[in-house]
Amino acid sequence: MVTRLFVVHGMGVFDQAWVKPVEQQIAEIYGSYETLSSEAQETRFTIHPIRYDDILSDLVKKWQTDAAAISKLSEGVSASSAEALVGWLKTAGEGFQWTHAADVLLYRCFSDVREAVVVTVANQMLKVINADLKKNQDARWGVLAHSLGTAVAHDSLHALWTTEFDSGIKISPADVKAAFVMMVANVSRVLETDADVLTSAVQPGKASNKVRGCLNFLTVRHALDPFTIPRMFDPEEWPDAETVEQGRYQSIRVNHFRERNIHGLKHYLSHPAVHVPLMRLLSDQKSVISAAEEKKALKDFTGFGGTPPDIATAELKRLELMQPARADTWAKLRSIWDAYFGA
Amino acid sequence: MTIRPSNIRLALFLLAAWLTLTPRPAEAQSCDGTKPVATAAEGVTQVRALNRAGCLGGPACDSPICRRLKPLLDGAPNRQQISDALRAVLEEARTVAEIGRDRESLLAQMGLSLAQFVDNRVAAAAAWTLEGLALFADEPHEIDLESRLENCSDSASCTLMSAHAQRVIELATLFRRTLVKADEGIRGAFSKQLELLDKRWRAYLGSSRGQYPWELAVNSALYRKTAQFDAPPTSQWIFAHPGAAFELSRSSNDRQPSESLLLEVAGLYRWSWKEEKMRQRWGGSVTMAWRDAGEGRQKLGYGALAYLPRASTIGYVWRPQDGNDEHSVVLSADIVKFLRGTDGIRERFMGASDSK
C-alpha cells in the first residue's frame, strides 16, 4: 500500500514546479537510510503538491496591472486622486512584502480570499483521495504542510471533515481519515480564524474515533523561528493525555542553524528529528529507520552544518533579539517580517 | 467456411506470441504467502511485503473471498450487496481467532451488534485501519500482529503465525475496503459539490468586477464565512473604484470616443450562479469622471453607470459649465470596440448622444 503525501506550501511565490526541490530533498533523505532505501521510494509513498498561491498571486498581479493602467491614464487627465488611490499598487507582486507578506495578509484578513483558498486546497486533495480510494479502498494518505500552509491545511481539512452539503452529503473522519498531519513551522494558531485549531476536527485519535481526522499529528518548530512564537501552537496533553501517551501527538523542537532562512521547509526537513518521524509515518513502519540508525543520524547531524561557527552564532544572536512574545498576535508578524528578512 | 492449416498455424502462432509477450501479473507470484519462514523477523518481513503489495485483502489479493468480492469492489454495488459482502467476510472470519472465534464479542467491544455492523454499517471504515501491523491500535481489543509474530520460537510456529497474521490482515482489509466502497457515491457527490465551489470561487475572484484591496476588505467584512465550505457571494459592493472608460459627447471635435478616467464612488453589482458561471449580472454605481480638456486642463464630471450582462458598462456623465453643460455617454472598452466595428451603428449612436 503506497502512501500519498500531500505537500502544502507556505508563503511566497510557488509555480507549478515548486515541489521539485522538496521531492529532491526527500529522495536524498530516503537514500540515506539503509533499511528504508532497500525498497524503491515509490513502493512506499508518492508526493502530490498542493498549490494555492495562484489564487493569491493572480489577485495581486491584477491589482498591479490595473493600477499601472489607471496611473497611466490619470497622467493624461491629471487626476491625482486616482493616482493616489492606486499608485501604491503599481509594484504589487514585487518584493517580499507582496510575495510573502501579502499572502498572509490576504489569507488572514480577507474571508472570501481565505474561503477560495480553503476550497481549492480541499478540492485538490479530495480529488486525489477519491481516485486513490476508487483504485484501492485501502489507500493511505498524509499531509505535510509548511508555514502559511499549516493554517491553510488546517482550515481545509477541518472544513472537509465537518461540512455537510445540501441533502446531507458529508464526509466524516470515520470514513476518510488521514494517516498523519505534519505541521512544520506551525502558524495555524496565530492565523486562526473560523475554527479553533485546538478543538477542530484536525486532531489525532484512534482509528475508531469518529470526529478526529488523523491518526497522528506532528507539530514542528525551530526554537528561534520567530513566526511560530506569537500564539504558539504548543498544547500539552493535546488533545488529551491518552492520545499523547499513545504517541499520536508529537511536538518536535529543533535548534540547528544550517542556513539563514531557518523558517524554510528545506532547513526544517534536513534535521533527522524532523525527517525520521516523517519517513516512518510515510512507510507505516517504525522499524524502517531503526533506533540505532536514528541515533546515529542525530549524532552525525551537526547543528551548524557547513556554516562557520562565528557566523552561525552571530545569526542565532540576531534571531534571539527579534523574538516576539508568545502573547503577540498575528498583527506582530509584520514587524517580524521586517526584522527577519530586512536585516 | 473451411479451416485451412495455414489459418490454424497463424492462430497458434498468435496464441504463442500472446502467451509469451503478455506479462504475467507480478502479484500472482509475490502474493504467495505460504513460503515457510525461519524466524520471527522473516515472518514480519513476509507479512509486511505481502501487505504492501496489496496481497492481503488488497487489489492484488487472489484468495477465494477476495475473488468473490472483487466484482463488488470494482463495481458499483447497492446497499444490499454491501451488506451481503460484509456478511460474507464475517462468515469467512468464523475460523480466525480474534475476529472470527469471538466475533460477536469483538463487535461488542467495538460497541456494535452484528445487525448494526452488517446491515447498518455503523462501524466506521477507518476503524479497520491497520497501523503498522496493529489492528484496532490502542483499543482494549487491539490485535498487535507484530508482537505476536515476534513471540514465535521456531520455523514451524513462525510460519503458522505468519499465515495467521496474513489472514487477520486480509479480513480486516476486506472489511475496510467494503465499508469504504459503500460510501463511494457519497464521496463522489461531495467531491462534485466541492469542485463546483472551487470553480465558482475562482470565477468570483477572476471574472467578477475587479476588486481593489479596499473593496475586497469591505466585501470580505460583509461576507459571512463559517468554518465549513461556503458558497461565494452573489453580490459585490463597489467602493472608490478607479477605472478607465470611453466618453462620447457632442463637444468632441472628431466625434471619436475619448478616454476617460472614472472613480466609482459607490455601487452594487449582483448576479446569480448557474453551475460555475455568473449569470444575470446587473448593478450600477455613482461615479466621478475626468476627461482631458487639452492644454493641461481636465474636466470633472458626475454621473451614473449601469453594469450590463457580460461585464459591459454604460453610463451617463454631466459636466456643469456656466450655462454650457456637457453631457456624455460613458462606454466600457468592449462596447467601443464593438461600435468601431460597426460604423453605421456608431453614427446612429452619436446622433442619439447629440440629442441630449
Image (cartoon, coloured by chain):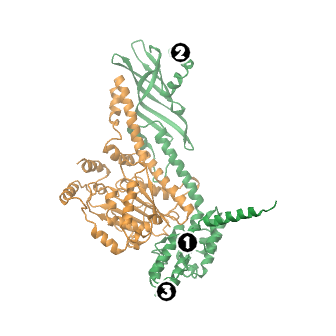
Dot placed on the residue nearer the N-terminal end, 3 or 1:
1
Figure colour of chain B:
green
> As shown in the figure, which amino acid type bears the numbered disc 2?
Gly
SS of the residue under disc 3: helix
* Residue to which mark 1 is pinned: B55
* Residue to which mark 3 is pinned: B155
Q: Position of residue A279 (x, y in %)?
A: 40, 66
Labels 3 and 1 in the same subunit? yes
Figure colour of chain A:
orange
* Residue to which mark 2 is pinned: B351
> As shown in the figure, which amino acid type bears the numbered disc 1?
Cys
SS of the residue under disc 2: helix
Q: Is residue B159 above or below residue A260?
A: below
Q: Position of residue A115 (x, y in %)?
A: 45, 49
SS of the residue under disc 1: loop
Residue A265 sits in which quadrant? bottom left
Q: Nearer the viewer, residue B241 or A13?
A: A13
In three-dimensional space, the C-alpha distance between marks 3 and 1, rounded to whole angstroms, equals 22 Å
Q: Position of residue B112 (x, y in %)?
A: 56, 73
Label 3 Cα neighbours within 10 Å, binned few <14 / some 14-19 / many ≥20? some
Badge 3: chain ID:
B
In three-dimensional space, the C-alpha distance between marks 3 and 2, rounded to whole angstroms, equals 102 Å
Labels 1 and 2 in the same subunit? yes
